[in-house]
Image: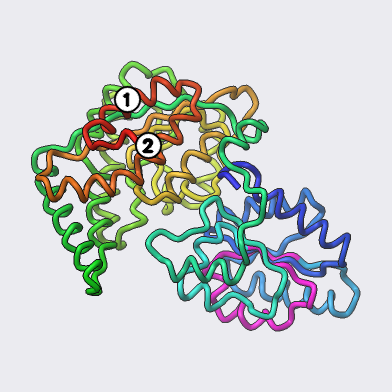
């Protein structure tokens, strides 16, 4: 189901249907982040559930859960719901309780693509037969084995799939305008980009010759370079200096999810600091940061300030890619178009959620233009670019200003002989 089209409510409706039809006794929901646990709890309460939240101190939830499971087995309580984070799932406290869940238990994996990671997949309960995986993008990026596990555990994709076009047509998501902003690399960045692309080409060639070679780290390194391209700050300044009165704007900085902790904290922190400085100090725009390090209580306060207009914008990194519900977003500026299709899909869905008074959303997408490359490297780049262009074009085609958006991408298609995309 397309991001933002109502996976949580659909899943809870399925749980209720199972309760009516077969007497479902227990529901386990596993989410990647703490803020998603609280979002799920809010929705679950609307369905008459009283969820136990498994994400803070073990003492707080473990006794509640063991009491609930005992009561269900004894027949003194009809149903028990527990909503936990992925990290709680793999802990001994949760694992030790799994054997006490009744036969009629449903497990829901939210953002199920995350559950293909080795430690997580080993922790999923095999004795629970009712399983539902939720994702807009079930395939794991550069991880065939993890993807295979997800489909082995949860089964094949249920039909009919709900695409972005379907969701917009049915009014589950709003219509939108799409403006690609083409950005050049600096001379130094272009040189580094060309070297990395050459090395990616060698790695691909050695793979084809049967030699084990991992191109993923090289692609990630290049994604970091593109994500932190210096000219994006200038492009953002040009865009926002004439839009000082706008509100409800989200700024996505370098996502950092393809990087190690040390690398990502330096590169992405530099970009987020530069964006906040330029918007807040230079242009006088009322913004604040919204990151994975922002405490939960502070996030709630920031979302409220954003919705009321007290804050004109949020500068976000990482934690807004999955599941965060801020439907008041009217405009988004994506400064780090990830080559990871999952992040691309998650982000666009975030801004298309309906909200009172929101008839249409606007998305500005900073796309870095590849530099001039030699003949051999050009062919490698062309093949890599083909996949990314397909996503940009699909998104452009569904926009209200499709013709204008496609014209902007046409130069890039012509340059690399990709008019067939």
Quote the CA–CA distance across marks 1 and 2. Answer: 16 Å
Circle 1 residues within 10 Å: few <14, some 14–19, many ≥20: some
In the foreground, 390 or 15: 390
Determine contact: label 1, label 2, CB under 8 Å: no
Q: Quadrant of the C terminus?
A: top left
The residue shown at (22%, 29%) is 234
Task: Check if residue 98 falls in the magenta segment.
Answer: yes
199 sits left or right of 418 in the view:
left
Residue found at the far right of this picture: 76
Residue 207 image point, x, y percent: 24, 68
Tell us which disc is closer to us: 1 or 2: 1
Residue 411 seen in this snapshot: yes
Residue 232 image point, x, y percent: 25, 34
240 versus 413 height, above or below? above
The residue shown at (38%, 29%) is 364
The residue shown at (54%, 67%) is 150
Residue highlighted by disc 1: 408
299 versus 412 height, above or below? below
Magenta extent: 81-108
Residue 310 seen in this snapshot: no
User: Any mark on residue 334, and which?
Assistant: 2
Residue 124, by quadrant, is bottom right
Residue 282 image point, x, y percent: 26, 25
SS assignment at label 2: strand
In the foreground, 356 or 63: 356
Residue 397 image point, x, y percent: 46, 29
228 versus 367 height, above or below? below
330 sits left or right of 75 in the view:
left
Circle 2 residues within 10 Å: few <14, some 14–19, many ≥20: many
Q: Disc 1 or 2, which lies upstream in sequence?
A: 2
Task: Check if residue 51 falls in the magenta segment.
Answer: no
């Amino acid at each position: 189901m397309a991001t933002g089209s109502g996976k949580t409510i659909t899943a809870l409706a399925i749980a209720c249907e199972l309760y009516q039809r077969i007497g479902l006794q227990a529901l386990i929901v596993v989410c990647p982040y703490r803020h998603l646990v609280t979002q799920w709890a809010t929705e679950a309460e609307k369905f008459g559930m009283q969820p136990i939240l498994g994400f803070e101190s073990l003492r707080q939830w473990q006794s509640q859960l063991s009491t609930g499971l005992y009561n269900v087995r004894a027949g003194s309580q009809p149903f028990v719901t527990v909503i936990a984070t992925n990290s709680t799932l793999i802990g001994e406290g949760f694992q030790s309780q799994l054997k006490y869940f009744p036969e009629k238990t449903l497990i829901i994996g939210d953002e199920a693509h995350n559950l293909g990671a080795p430690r997580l997949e080993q922790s999923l309960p095999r004795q629970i037969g009712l399983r539902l995986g939720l994702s807009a993008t079930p395939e794991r990026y550069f991880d065939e084995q993890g993807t295979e596990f997800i489909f082995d555990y949860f089964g094949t994709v249920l039909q009919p799939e709900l695409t972005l076009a379907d969701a917009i047509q049915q009014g589950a998501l709003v219509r939108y305008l799409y403006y690609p902003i083409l950005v050049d690399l600096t001379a130094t960045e272009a040189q580094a980009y060309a070297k990395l692309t050459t090395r990616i080409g060698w790695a691909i060639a050695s793979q084809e010759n049967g030699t084990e070679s991992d191109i993923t780290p090289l692609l990630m390194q290049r994604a970091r370079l593109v994500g932190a391209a210096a000219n994006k700050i200038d492009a953002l300044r040009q865009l926002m200096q004439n839009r000082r009165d706008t509100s409800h704007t989200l700024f996505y900085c370098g996502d950092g999810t393809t990087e190690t902790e040390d690398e990502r904290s330096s590169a992405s922190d530099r970009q987020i600091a530069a964006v906040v400085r330029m918007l807040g100090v230079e242009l006088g725009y009322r913004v604040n940061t919204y990151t994975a390090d922002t405490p939960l209580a502070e996030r709630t306060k920031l979302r409220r300030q954003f919705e009321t207009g007290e804050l004109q914008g949020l500068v976000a990194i990482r934690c807004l890619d999955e599941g965060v519900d801020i439907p008041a977003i009217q405009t988004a500026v994506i400064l780090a178009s990830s080559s990871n299709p999952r992040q691309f899909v998650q982000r666009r869905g975030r801004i298309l959620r309906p909200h009172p008074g929101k008839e249409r959303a606007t998305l500005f997408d900073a796309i870095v233009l590849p530099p001039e490359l030699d003949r051999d490297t050009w062919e490698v780049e062309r093949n890599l670019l083909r996949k990314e262009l397909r996503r940009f074009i699909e998104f452009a085609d569904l926009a209200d200003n499709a013709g204008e958006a496609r014209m902007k991408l046409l130069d890039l298609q012509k340059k690399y002989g990709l008019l067939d995309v």
